[in-house]
Image: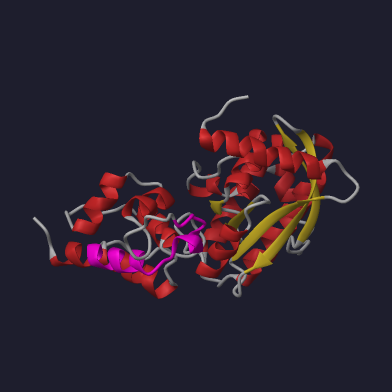
């Protein structure tokens, strides 16, 4: 049986869907489009949901979306922070604390990410939790959406899971470790003293990683703003790239994008990465 909140949730989703132009979210406006804004199937695609499931939500059929699905819908529909909070209220879900997988991504950052179609780019939190990636970032770095809890943080995985380190050449590991520890200290310093996400992760890393504990004792503090790094790709080998950062106003989120380092062959490799990504998306094989 429908409740008034379920009905209002459907109406709210529909109203937000109808105000967005396809080109604003990286979609092509076809010549036969008959509806204002996005179609239901397009929202479902952007949010990673089935079309039937999204249709149920708009009909107010009684489904209660998970917090992860609500976060995906908020990003797909480019909701403001106030609109995102209202969406959670209508779904009878608590508004998540900023920093985790369900963190709200500012619509401006999502807009920039959508426009970065020729270079790998992603939005992460200050704890290095990946919130959203474009297809080229997934092709370069792997899909980061399958991690949960503290493991969602790449910094945490770096110091606790040897598999996470395969992305960088072994000789680069000490420099990466030092940079991650200094960046984490800078990020923790910006957070409220009552914030437990950062303190809990730091305590866990101190307990589980001797390397992290030794670096933490050095008290280095420095945000990672612009790095040159080498990334190992399983098909293309080592790519020399510049990793550039755009910080949100409160410093809690960063838009990262990768460009080829000057004087290397990485520009051609990134072009090949785009070809590989297109083939994967279309299901084509060589």
Q: Main secondary structure of the magenta part?
A: helix
Which residue lies at the image location 30% right of the left edge and 46% below the top edge? 51
Image side of residue 167 versus residue 106, left or right: right
Pinpoint residue 73: horizontal percent, then vertical percent.
38, 58
Residue 18 appears in the picture as rendered: yes
> With respect to residue 279, does 113 lie above or below?
below
x 63%, y 57%: residue: 116
In this picture, which residue range is highlighted in magenta? 9-29
| Depth check, front residue: 214 or 15 | 15
Farthest residue, direction front: 31
Image quadrant in which the C terminus is located: top right
Residue 1 x %, y %: 8, 55
- Give the farthest residue toward the left: 1
Tell me which residue sits at (29%, 53%) in the image.
65
Residue 221 placement, left or right of 204: right
- Quarter of the image for residue 249 reads bottom right
> Residue 70 falls in which quadrant of the image?
bottom left
Question: Is 101 contained in the magenta span?
Answer: no
């Amino acid at each position: 049986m429908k409740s008034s909140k379920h009905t209002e949730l459907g109406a709210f989703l529909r109203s937000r869907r109808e105000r967005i132009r396809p080109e604003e979210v990286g979609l092509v406006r076809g010549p036969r489009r008959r509806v204002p804004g996005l179609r239901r199937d397009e929202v479902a695609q952007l949010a990673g949901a089935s079309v039937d499931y999204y249709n149920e939500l708009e009909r107010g059929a009684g489904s209660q979306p998970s917090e992860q699905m609500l976060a995906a819908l908020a990003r797909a529909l480019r909701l403001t922070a106030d609109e995102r909070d209202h969406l959670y209220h209508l779904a009878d879900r608590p508004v998540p604390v900023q920093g985790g997988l369900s963190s709200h991504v500012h619509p401006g950052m999502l807009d920039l990410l959508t426009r970065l179609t020729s270079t790998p780019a992603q939005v992460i939190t200050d704890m290095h939790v990946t919130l959203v990636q474009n297809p080229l970032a997934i092709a370069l770095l792997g899909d980061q959406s399958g991690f949960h809890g503290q493991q969602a943080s790449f910094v945490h995985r770096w110091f606790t899971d040897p598999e996470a380190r395969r992305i960088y050449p072994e000789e680069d590991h000490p420099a990466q470790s030092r940079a991650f520890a200094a960046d984490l200290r800078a990020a923790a310093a910006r957070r409220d003293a009552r914030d437990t996400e950062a303190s809990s992760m730091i305590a866990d890393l101190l307990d589980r990683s001797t390397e992290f504990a030794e670096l933490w004792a050095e008290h280095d503090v420095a945000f990672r703003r612009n790095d040159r790094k080498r990334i190992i790709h399983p098909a293309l080998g080592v790519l020399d790239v510049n990793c550039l950062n755009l910080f949100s106003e409160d410093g809690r989120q960063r838009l990262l994008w990768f460009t080829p380092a000057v004087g290397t062959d990485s520009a051609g490799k990134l072009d090949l990465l785009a070809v590989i990504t297109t083939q994967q998306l279309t299901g084509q094989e060589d």
